[in-house]
Each structure stands twice: as structure tokens, then as C-alpha cells.
Amino acid sequence: MEKLLLFSILGFVLGVGFVELTYRFIKKGLLNFYFLSLPLKLSLWAFGLYLSYVLGSLFSFVLCLLGFLFGFFSMLILRGYVKDGRPKDA
């Protein structure tokens, strides 16, 4: 049971980190570095999915994938409504 929770949290952290790093690279004008770092971020995500499948089961793989999707889309929504720690039109 602990492994399933661990892998879902791992997927969530990878999803949040993916969006957050992308946002920071674009905000600081490091877009070229973003394209260089994209394979690294994608390989970290693939490695997390691989570990969840090897150390867990197919169910932990699915939970890691769902955690990634939840973290990814929740950060996209938050980045749309929150800018620099405050709501957009505040």
C-alpha cells in the first residue's frame, strides 16, 4: 500500500516539476535552454514510470501516470490563475 502512495506522489511531483521548470525557463528568457532540458525532463518522467512498473506493478504504473497527469494539469490551471504569488487581476 505504501508503494502505491509513493508512486502516485512521485508522479505528482514529476508533473508539477515539469510545468514549474518550463514556466521558470520561459519567464527568465532561457527558452533555448528549455529545449535542451526537455529530453532530460522527459527521461526523468520515463524513468519514474519505469521504476514504478519494475518496483511495483501495473497498478503502481497507472497511479504514477495519473499522479503525473493530475500534477501537470493542476499546475497548468494554477499558472493560469496565479501570477507571481497573487491572483492575476489583484
Image: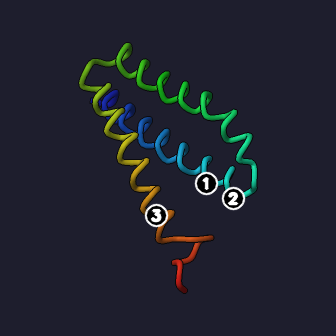
CA neighbours of label 1 inside 10 A, class few (<14), some (14 to 19), many (20+):
some
Identify which residue, 53 or 55, lies in the foreground.
Answer: 53
- Give x and y (percent) for residue 61: 32, 25
Q: Are marks 1 and 2 in contact (CB under 8 Å)?
A: yes
Q: Which residue is labeled 3 in the image?
A: 78
Q: Quadrant of the C terminus?
A: bottom right
Q: Which residue is labeled 2 in the image?
A: 27
Q: Is residue 28 above or below residue 54?
A: below
- 33 displayed left or right of 12: right
- Spatial CA distance of label 3 from label 1 is 12 Å
Q: Amino acid at mark 2?
A: Lys
Label located before the other in sequence (3 or 1) = 1
Q: Amino acid at mark 1?
A: Tyr
The numbered dot on residue 45 is none
Q: Is residue 2 above or below residue 70?
A: above
- Give x and y (percent) for residue 27: 69, 59
- Give x and y (percent) for residue 14: 49, 39
Q: Which residue is labeled 1 in the image?
A: 23
Residue placed farthest to the left in the image?
Answer: 59
User: Which quarter of the figure has residue 34?
Assistant: top right
Secondary structure state at the residue bearing disc 3: helix
- Give x and y (percent) for residue 57: 28, 18
User: Which quarter of the figure has residue 63?
Assistant: top left
Please name the residue shown 67% across and 34% down the image: 37
Please name the residue shown 46% across and 64% down the image: 78
- 30 displayed left or right of 46: right
